[in-house]
Amino acid sequence: MRIQLFQYIRAKQMALLCLLLLVLSVLNWYSGDGLIAARQEFDRHNLYQFFEQESFDNDVVLDTYLLPASGQHERLSNLQLLNLKRDRFAYIARKNGKAIAIAVPATAEDGFNGTIDLLVSVDMYGRIGAARVVQDISSNQLYGVVDVIESSWMKEFTGNSMRDILRLGWQTISAENEYDQFVGASVTPKSVANQIYDALVFFQSNRIELMRGNSHEF
């Protein structure tokens, strides 16, 4: 009887140990590769709105060009125009191996020591596919950062090129455009339009280099 009790207790201990190991393995997965994979999937889902559906066949989350916040890069010019506050990716959309559009990050100043993060996709003709504000995560994460804030006014940039951008910066934004909802009254349309314009200048200056991609290399 005593032996059976000992075996029962031993079996319980082993079961608890196995459960603990399972929990630890799951936590380890989420804290390591699993967490990165989840963040990549989050970005992958949100990046689809920056490129035309079925216009690309690559994984835009992994086909990237890493842009440093330092403003210095041996192969890129005018990097300071993006005004980046942290390292961020440019995302490259390809069809049959050929680049068809690139989403370039940028940061606009709000005039009160604050900033908003932008992501602007541009096709090879210099036309904007989408310009959006993305949630500022205030961290150095490279994945899980494409959290788009909806705005009717930002959608007006779609289809425009450099010569059209500054005109949009002077437009009146009505309450229906939800502008104050995501950036606050302190950020002016002109500051956002100017930053998008600068992002297009950067794109035009570095289009060939950006098309190469570099993943995590500087």
Image (cartoon, grey):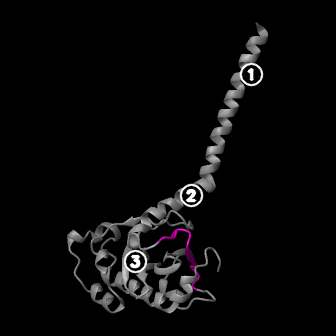
Question: Picture coordinates of residue 203 (x, y %)?
Answer: 47, 87
| Residue ID at (37%, 85%) | 127
Q: Which mark is residue 112?
A: 3
Question: Picture coordinates of residue 147 (x, y %)?
Answer: 43, 64
Looking at the picture, does residue 19 appear above or below residue 85? above
Instruction: Compare marks 2 and 3 and give the one earlier in the sequence.
Output: 2
Q: Is disc 3 placed on a helix, strand or loop?
A: loop
Q: Residue furthest right?
A: 3
Q: CA distance from mark 2 to mark 1?
A: 38 Å
Q: Is disc 2 placed on a helix, strand or loop?
A: helix
Q: Which mark is nearer the camera, 2 or 3?
A: 2
Q: Residue furthest top?
A: 1
Contact between marks 2 and 1 (CB within 8 A): the answer is no
Q: Is residue 68 magenta?
A: yes
Residue for badge 1: 10
Q: What is the span of residues highlighted in magenta in the rendered image?
A: 57-71
Mark 2 nearby-residue class (10 Å; few <14, some 14–19, many ≥20): some
In the visual, does 191 lie left or right of 216? left
| Residue ID at (40%, 84%) | 195
In the visual, does 175 lie left or right of 216? left
| Amino acid beneath label 2 | Ala
Depth check: give the residue in front, 93 or 67: 93
Question: Picture coordinates of residue 114 (x, y %)?
Answer: 43, 74
Residue for badge 2: 37
| Amino acid beneath label 1 | Arg
